[in-house]
Amino acid sequence: MADFSAHCLEEFSVETESGKLSLQLMEVEDLRRAGLDYAAQKRREPFSLLFEGPESPFLSQKIYPFQHETMGSFELFIVPIGKNENKVQYQVIFN
């Protein structure tokens, strides 16, 4: 979670069938629940990422290769979750 939090509001490049697309990391949210004991929370660090990108091309729910200038290359499973003005919001959950 800390790795992504350090890059909030930065651009990430996503490789799609039609070329590269830029998504902006809008939010990193801690998903640990109050009520779990301390030991359980130390073993798990569930969190979510919220990205925003253009309406077109629309990215369907699946795994995409991501690239970031500092974090390097990695794959994420993204899910479209809604629209905000003329942008599409995508979520990634680590549990």
Image (cartoon, grey):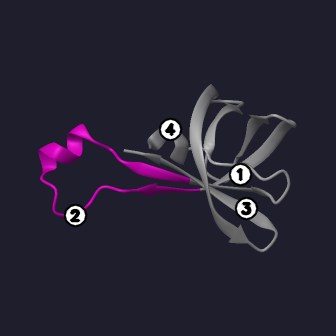
Residue beneath the point at 78% across and 36% down: 16
Residue 39 quadrant: top left
Q: Which residues are magenta?
A: 27-49
Instruction: Label 2, secondary structure: give it.
Output: loop
The CA span between labels 1 and 4 is: 15 Å
What type is the residue that disc 4 sits on?
Asp
Instruction: Label 1, secondary structure: give it.
Output: strand
Tell me, yes or no, whether the two marked residues, 2 and 3, touch with CB atoms within 8 Å: no
Tell me, yes or no, whether the two marked residues, 1 and 4, touch with CB atoms within 8 Å: no
Q: In this rendering, is residue 95 above or below 71?
A: below
Closer to the eye: label 1 or 3: 3
The CA span between labels 2 and 3 is: 30 Å
The CA span between labels 1 and 3 is: 11 Å
Which residue is disc 3 drawn over? 88
Tell me, yes or no, whether the two marked residues, 4 and 3, touch with CB atoms within 8 Å: no
Q: How far from the left and from the top, in percent, is residue 3?
A: 50, 38
Verify whether residue 40 appears in magenta. yes
Which residue is disc 2 drawn over? 34
Closer to the eye: label 2 or 3: 3
Q: How far from the left and from the top, in percent, is residue 5?
A: 52, 47
Which quadrant of the rendered structure holds the N terminus? top left
Q: How far from the left and from the top, in percent, is residue 40?
A: 16, 45
Closer to the eye: label 4 or 3: 3
Instruction: Label 3, secondary structure: give it.
Output: strand
The disc placed on residue 3 is 4
What type is the residue that disc 3 sits on?
Val
